[in-house]
Amino acid sequence: MDRTQGQVDPAEPSSGPARVVTLTAGDFTLTVNPVDGSEIEPLRPGAERARPRRRDAAGRAARDTAARPPVLPGAPASARLTPAREEERARLVRLLSHGRSVRLTGPSGSGRSGLLDAVAADCAGVAPDGVVRLSGYGQQQPGELLHALYAAVYEAPDERPLRPDREELLARVREIGAVVLLDDLEMGGAALDELLRATPECAYLLAATPDTKAPSDASHLEEVFLGGLGRAESVEFLEAGVGRALTEEETAWAGDLRFASEGLPLRFVQAAALLRQRDELNGTRGGDEDEEPGVFEERPRDAAFVPLPTLAEGAAPAELLASRVSESARAVLRIACALGGELPHHAHLPALVGDTHADAAVAELLGCGLLTPVGTRYRLASGVARQLEEVGYGDPAAEEARTAARHYAWWTGHASVTPERVAAEADAVLAALAGADVVAAVLLARTAAPAFAASLHWEAWERVLRSGAEAARKAGEVAEQAYFHHELGVLALCEGRLERARAELEASIGLKGALADKRGTVAGRRALALVTDREAAGAAAVSPPLRLAPPVGGAVALAAPGPVAALGPAVPVAATGPTVPVALAAPVGPRASEAVTAVVPARRDAPANLAEVFAEPFPMSLKPSPAPALAPPVAARPVAGSRKRTVLLAAAGALTVAALGTVVALAVGSGDEETTPAGPGPKVSSTTPDVPAAGTDTAGEPGGNDSAGDPADPAGSGSGAVTEAEPGATTPGEGADAPTPGVSRGAGVKPSGGGTPSRKPPVVPPKTSPVASPPTTSTSPSSSPSASVTPTATPTPTTSVSAPTATGTGTGT
């Protein structure tokens, strides 16, 4: 029993301890445990990762041998190129030697793989890192190809497997200088550009089919197209495959076959197999005279003459070729059809077929042209699977897939099987997983997932985990479903996909909590804590610098006391009030690298009134401050929401005017020696001369400027109107002693012709806090309206501004 080749008894139970592998993945230490699930933890602070070393020539040769398809039992098949392919071979070697990357395009069966083998032998000493052979079959993104290239050139310095993170991976592959032969390319466009940019020191030979996505114009790839064989070349190629000269009838048949198949070499390989089988059936091949027919094979002793195949049979020869091979070979074809064209390693065929000599069937099928090499394995050639399924080879597909799944579930979980061998069989394992029933699929995914994780073949690991989670959900296996979600979360965390990791880990924790799995719950919460730490570190790393700036959209500069000739367009404060000119400044926006943060200060001591709010920005000093520089007016542009913006600006202007009026009143009244006692009504500053009424003293008794004792307002409603003098008081404009408008007499000074007027009228500050009702400005009949108050000795008419009250709205007289 050869356990190294996998020929083991499926009935034998797995022996040995569970395969626990510890590896380094980026900044994490990952312990792959097949029993309880993987455990992940950050690298210890003192542990430094050793720098990977490059493989030497012997290491590269061993790696290249491992990347080739397995050697089959029997005589090796001779690979021979036609003269047309020899010219293309020399051209490809010349381009690669000059560091140029080439895209070799040809249909399936045009001989691309054989041409790559010949070019690899000629370019062995061209690049410092030698020749690296990769397979792009099933690869749509460059990530796994870069990891495969890294593993082919570098090796870990210790026994612990190393899978670098993206930053380290890009830094390492940028230093690789090799000739990379990439067969079965399936990506193009931006993905291919990313692969080429990541490895600028590599020269690529990309083999692809015409239906593969084309590269972009920036890739600068040389294009080489493989066409079909000519008439003379096809006849020569067919004679080399048959081993004899063709007859005239066979030559004419070969010409018709070239026209029907467009000269593809694969069709002539299959045609040569048909002619060899015909010669054997007709008894015309040499070396068979001494052997009695029908002893070891099911051939009739008296064979009839077999005619030349028809042109239709030559163009689609799979059915005819399969009917003439051994029974073991036909059983292998049924297994391959059940696995979607994937062929298991020939070491697994005796257990799958039930024949100890079934491993020799691979060489038989390869010689017939029914198989083709793909990377480290074989699969059905182009068009063969469809032709065989039409004649019934795909009928037992469900049973064959279930058998293959149970076999691989036992094999992948065996302790003697290394993770690298499981990774080499990844495509067949995935195909068996896709075609098996849910019970067999859960069992296979549970045993194959740890092996793929330990082999660093993480694309296959993710596919197995997702298929296993879906199969466990359908089968009702809650414990297995929790395991698959936990592994998916760990995988996403290692690859930096934090949102996906959080979702998978939370689902796993919920399922394990329902099962009362304390150990699994703790492992899941530890991994989730790492996700939280990475999210916090990422948020702190990308946080933009703090910059305090005004809101985007423009700032409104209110007009200060002074000239208003340079102000912009006026904005109405109220429907019946005056307009307040404003200057629209240029919009202030953040720079591209900064973020604007609106800071709202939190004040624990709320102001008692509006005067306290403006105490700091508006000091109680009458010293005029220079007018601020005003931005040039900006022409209004029709934007959405302009009407709403105008209303908001009007409300802001009205509130500011009320505040300015209150502050000016406080500033003017702060210098008086004596003030009038407060009354129940509001106190109003007015430009009307304050003349004491007859019969009152200088202490501000009734008859002064107090509205509480005003006969005109007996109810004391405090409407905010300017109070009228009592009967007998001197009014402005009456008698010779009438004061000048805008100038009031000081307290205790009786009106006389030689009296000196005071510059400050007595004003009493309001006792109550104003409300948010819109204020109203009024102008006395004897003064002209002005938008500023000039604290100079020259008497000028001023605007009377009444403060809003808590019970009513001020009106101007």
Image: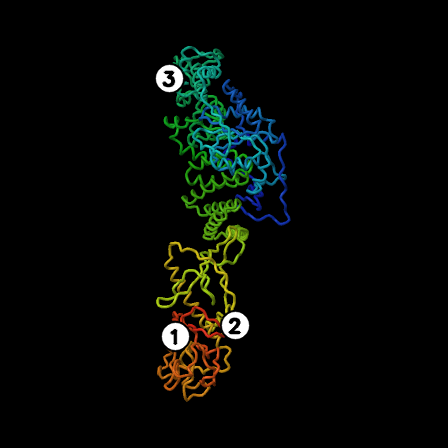
The amino acid type found where label 1 is placed reads: Ser
Q: In which quarter of the image is the N terminus?
A: top right
Label whose residue precedes the other's in the sequence (2 or 1): 2
In which quadrant is the C terminus drawn? bottom left
Q: What residue type is labelled 2?
A: Ser
Q: Residues within 10 Å of mark 3 (few under 14, many from 20)?
A: few
Identify the residue position indicated by label 3 in the image: 310
Spatial CA distance of label 2 from label 1 is 26 Å
Tell me the crowding category of disc 1: few under 14, some 14 to 19, or many 20 or more residues within 10 angstroms, Cα based.
some
Q: Is residue 136 visible?
A: yes
Q: Nearer the viewer, mark 2 or mark 3?
A: 2
Secondary element under disc 2, as helix, strand or loop, is: loop
Secondary structure of residue under mark 1: loop
Question: Is any atom of residue 522 visible in this view?
Answer: no
Q: Residue 780 carries which label?
A: 1
Q: Nearer the viewer, residue 238 or 175?
A: 175
Q: What element carries label 3?
A: loop
Residue 280 place in picture, x, y as percent: 44, 15
